[in-house]
Amino acid sequence: ITIGVVRETAAGERRVALDPETVARLTAADHDVLIEFGAGEEARFPDSAYQQASASLATRSEIIDQCDVLAVVHAPGADTIALLRAGQFLIGLLDPLNDPVLVAALTQTGVTAAAFELLPRTLSRAQSMDALSSQASAAGYKAAVVAADSFGRYLPMMITASGTARPANLIVIGTGVAGLQAIATSRRLGAVVTGYDVRPASRGEVESLGARFLTSSIAEGAAAGGYARALSPEEHELQQTELARELVTFDIIITTAKVPGRTPPLLVSAETLTALKPGSVCVDLAASDLGGNVSGSVDRKTVVTAGGVSIIGAGDLAAELPTSASAMYARNIHALLESFTTDNQLQVDLTNDIHTAVLICHNGEVVNAQLHARRL
Ligand code: NAD
């Protein structure tokens, strides 16, 4: 199989779909790998490292022309998609649930397209392919580091000859994969950490990391598949009032609260922001074009309020840890490719639950139940 990797073109994206280590595993298994010149540069993987892993360097058009599989982080632009053809495979974080135009364009080309967002994450056989988790984990780690970097004070308690510093009080709102990693990392940095979520099941996970769990009065915020459900307007109001009371005691707020297919809930209101101490920091991992968890957060920008609170919009923070995030992502690609490979040939099996879940389209037709359900 010939696997191609192109340079990512999305603004601020520094990751690459395959790292040299995974390329070496693929070439050792008799696959050919084509890497676009400079594709790994931003992730600190020079072209020479790919050559040492027995990949060939090529131009974008040579890769599109020759590859059986195109591995990407994000969907390539419309020009590249238009060049794809039936029989080729596209694998990536293609965001099909939010991008019907892309789904239509891919289906029209006849490619077989697989999106990590559609993977059944709770299946244990699929865990090595779970790119949402690997990237959320990288983002959660980086959120704690970014928060510490922007905060003008120490995170740990410091007792020195020149005085004593009290530890920073930090809360993580939304304790899924990213939130738990943010908790673990900020604990290592010495902050006093609290976690908060509407899924009661997350209490045990937060406490096992040595953090306090802030109890919510939302009785049951979990829905199918282990995700949170969207709250009713009354529940949302109750939550905002409850949180507003608690949040004023924190120096650092990291938010990661998302509900699949919905705009993220607003959890830190403008009023709460005015009550925070000057120098406080909010890192909003839910920030996107649609808004975020923190009032006034703007994705990929830092906004400082009149009261001296920094709001860091950080919707895709995994891209800011490009070397580790790419290495983990490459392993997810490798595992997903293995599931589609029989006798060194790509094979789609529409009786395989991973294949039916993860595929957007195959042979010019949308084959995904979730996408079909959205169209009705
Ligand atoms: P996510 O990115 O969709 O959301 C992040 C967190 O925000 C979640 O914990 C969610 O409960 C929380 N949230 C949503 N609305 C909220 C609100 N109004 N107030 C407070 N918190 C709110 O979630 P995720 O990190 O992708 O994971 C979701 C769940 O799936 C977790 O339980 C995770 O452990 C589970 N999961 C399981 C597996 C597996 O079994 N292998 C793999 C991945 C994730």
Image (cartoon, helix red, strand yellow):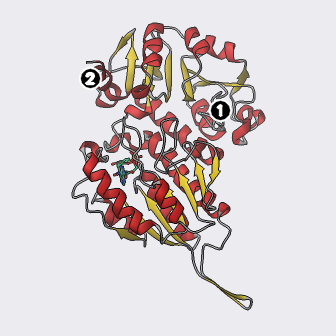
Which residue is at 66% across, 61% downward?
150
Q: Name the residue tied to disc 2.
A: 373
Residue 181 can be seen, yes or no: no
- Disc sitting over residue 11 in the figure: 1
Judge by depth and name the residue closer to the eye, 34 or 275: 275
Q: Amino acid at mark 2?
A: Ala
Judge by depth and name the residue closer to the eye, 73 or 228: 228
Q: Indicate the secondary structure of the residue bearing disc 1.
A: loop
Quarter where residue 326 is shown: top right
- 334 left or right of 49 in image: left
Which residue is at 74% across, 31% downward?
51
Earlier in the chain: of badge 1 and badge 2, it is 1
The outermost residue toward the bottom is 161
- Total numbered labels: 2
Quadrant for the C terminus in the image: top left
Which residue is at 55% across, 31% downward?
29
Q: Whole-Å distance between the Cαs marked 1 and 2? A: 31 Å
Please, is residue 156 above or below residue 257 in the view? below
Residue 335 can be seen, yes or no: yes
